[in-house]
Each structure stands twice: as structure tokens, then as C-alpha cells.
């Protein structure tokens, strides 16, 4: 019985030791793969950054991600202004809004939505809503007041729709909004999936008599 007990105990000890070694071996394999990946990732990023540059207006843009779209500033702002909605109008014609609401108008206005582009626009607006420089929230409030001062008609629903369109145009032409998106694009362009074309400079044509 003593010999049999020693054999059983030895077998159990052997099995446990065998499982321990097997587990340790598997951990070492996974750890080795993790180390290989950590060593390769920076090289892949550098390769993407160096092999896929694009030149725009004489300036080299280095990218960490592949560019999947090309936009003008007006195209970008057409998405951004949808985060400045008119959500209500009272009997006195005063407009109410809510900056960057989740239920924005993108779903009802864009057949093919770009969620990454929408996220970029929302992030820029939130970051500069009241930053002391661009203060986009104050520009939004100015737009609501200016649009509310217009005669938008008698029917409430029609007034609301007209007010929304007028506010979209007000914000799209807003100097601060245009400046902040150009600034953030230049700062984040290596992380963005789109290429923003530079604004075209329109040269003034001479008048008929040739005077400047």
C-alpha cells in the first residue's frame, strides 16, 4: 500500500508539474508574439508616414493613415454646420438651439454619411465652443439672434425650416468657424482620413477701362 501510495502521489506531482510547464510555455509564446508586434508597429507607422506623402500647394503632407476622400473647405463645413441646429421657435419668434445634439440633421440630409468626418467636426466644435479664442458657442448665439430678427413668415413650421436654413448659411460663412477648421486640419491632418484642398485664391479681373 505504501508503494502504491507513493506511485499515485508521484503521478499527481508529475501531472501538475507537466501542466505548469505547458502553461508557462504557452505564456512565453504569447509574450514573444506581443514583443514582436510592439517592435513592428513603430516601423509600420514610419513606413506609412514616409511612403504615402502627398503634396498639396507645394507642401508635403505626411500621413499615418491612408487617404480615402478629398474635400474642399465648403464640403467640410457643409457637414460641420449640421451641429448648429434650430430646435424650436416660440410665439414671439425667438429661436432656441442646442450645440452638437446627438439627433443632428445628418441622417436626414446626407444619403452617404461619413461618421469619421462627423466625429472630427463635432470634436472641433466642442473643443472651441468657449475657448477664449474662437468661441463658437457665442457665434452660434449671434446667428440665432440675427436669424430671429428676420421676417420668416406666419406658419410656425415654415418659419422653423427657413430659420434652420438661414442659420446653416450664417455658420458656413462664419469667419471664425472657417478659421478653426483650417487650424485643426493642419494640426491633425496626419491622423485624418481625408485630404483638404487649399482654398482657391480668386484673382480680381481688371475693369473695362483697364484701371486697377
Image: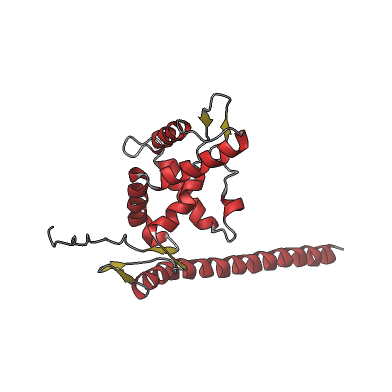
Residue that sits furthest to the right in the current view: 1
Residue that sits furthest to the bottom in the current view: 51
Instruction: Name the one closer to the observer, 20 or 81.
Output: 81
Instruction: Name the one closer to the observer, 171 or 195.
Output: 171
Residue at (53%, 31%) from the top-left corner? 96
Whether 179 is drawn above or below 209: the answer is above
Q: Is residue 148 left or right of residue 103?
A: left
Residue that sits furthest to the top in the current view: 92
Residue at (82%, 62%) from the top-left corner? 5
Q: Is residue 123 left or right of residue 202?
A: right
Q: Is residue 158 left or right of residue 183?
A: right
Residue at (51%, 47%) from the top-left corner? 82
Residue at (51%, 66%) from the top-left corner? 34
Q: Could you tell me residue 12's position as x and y percent? A: 76, 64
Q: How many marks?
A: 0
Quarter location, residue 101: top right
Q: Could you tell me residue 156's position as x and y percent? A: 61, 33
Quarter location, residue 1: bottom right
Q: Could you tell me residue 56's position as x and y percent? A: 30, 68
> Which image quarter holds the C terminus?
bottom left
- Whether residue 120 can be seen here: no
Q: How is the image coloured?
A: secondary structure
Instruction: Name the one closer to the observer, 17 or 191.
Output: 191
Residue that sits furthest to the front in the current view: 209
- Whether residue 172 can be seen here: yes
Q: Is residue 12 left or right of residue 87?
A: right
Q: Could you tell me residue 83's position as x and y percent? A: 50, 44
Amino acid at each position: 500500500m505504501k508503494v502504491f501510495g507513493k506511485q499515485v502521489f508521484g503521478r499527481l506531482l508529475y501531472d501538475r508539474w507537466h501542466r505548469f510547464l505547458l502553461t508557462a510555455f504557452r505564456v512565453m509564446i504569447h509574450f514573444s508574439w506581443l514583443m514582436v508586434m510592439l517592435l513592428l508597429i513603430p516601423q509600420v507607422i514610419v513606413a506609412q508616414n514616409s511612403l504615402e506623402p502627398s503634396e498639396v500647394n507645394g507642401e508635403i503632407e505626411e500621413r499615418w493613415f491612408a487617404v480615402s476622400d478629398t474635400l474642399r473647405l465648403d464640403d467640410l463645413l457643409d457637414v460641420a454646420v449640421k451641429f448648429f441646429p434650430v430646435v424650436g421657435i416660440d410665439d414671439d419668434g425667438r429661436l432656441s438651439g442646442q450645440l452638437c445634439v446627438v439627433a443632428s440633421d445628418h441622417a436626414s440630409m446626407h444619403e452617404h454619411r461619413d461618421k469619421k468626418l462627423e466625429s472630427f467636426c463635432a470634436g472641433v466644435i466642442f473643443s472651441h465652443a468657449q475657448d477664449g479664442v474662437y468661441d463658437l458657442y457665442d457665434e452660434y448665439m449671434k446667428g440665432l439672434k440675427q436669424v430671429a430678427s428676420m421676417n420668416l413668415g406666419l406658419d410656425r413650421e415654415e418659419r422653423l425650416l427657413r430659420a434652420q436654413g438661414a442659420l446653416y448659411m450664417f455658420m458656413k460663412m462664419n469667419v471664425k468657424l472657417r478659421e478653426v477648421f483650417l487650424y485643426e486640419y493642419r494640426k491633425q491632418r496626419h491622423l485624418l482620413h481625408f485630404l483638404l484642398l487649399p482654398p482657391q485664391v480668386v484673382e480680381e479681373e481688371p475693369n473695362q477701362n483697364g484701371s486697377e
